Amino acid sequence: MWARDGRELFYREGEWMMAVSITRDPFRPGPPRRLFEFPAGIYNMDQNFADFDTAPDGRFLAVRGSAATPDEIHFVLNWSEDLRHALGR
């Protein structure tokens, strides 16, 4: 995942969030450095999907998995009718 300013590249390496500084002209990556622990058991629900991003102010945002399983599932049929009714249309 690229930083919003395009000067760093973030990636996961095992249980760590890593960063590499990038120089553009000429293109040259800096040495990788560990940022913080990022346990895959909690934050890696799908290896084919980036489950983190950076906010415009530089903070990291992450999707945290849950070990809890739902006790019940609710199906909503004709949800478009419910939406029309709720919007008064």
Image: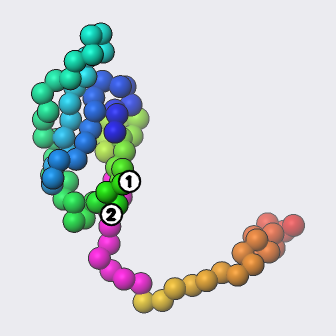
- Give x and y (percent) for residue 56: 41, 35
Q: Amino acid at mark 2?
A: Met
Left or right of residue 21: residue 75: right
The secondary structure type at the circle numbered 1 is loop
The secondary structure type at the circle numbered 2 is loop
- Give x and y (percent) for residue 75: 61, 83
Residue 38, placed above or below residue 60: below
Q: Which mark is residue 49?
A: 1
* Magenta stretch, residue numbers: 62-70
For residue 11: magenta?
no
Q: Is residue 4 visible?
A: yes
Tell me if mark 2 has few (under 14), some (14-19) or many (20+) residues whose alpha carbon lies within 10 angstroms of its own: some
Left or right of residue 89: residue 54: left
Residue 32, quarter of picture: top left
Q: Is residue 86 visible?
A: no
Q: Residue at x 25, y 42 (%)?
A: 11
For residue 69: magenta?
yes
Residue 42, placed above or below residue 34: below
Q: Residue at x 36, y 83 (%)?
A: 69
How has the structure been colored for display?
rainbow
Tell me if mark 1 has few (under 14), some (14-19) or many (20+) residues whose alpha carbon lies within 10 angstroms of its own: few
Residue of label 2: 45
Q: Are marks 1 and 2 in contact (CB under 8 Å)?
A: yes
- Name the outermost residue toward the top: 25
- Give x and y (percent) for residue 70: 41, 84
Q: Nearer the viewer, residue 83 or 44?
A: 44
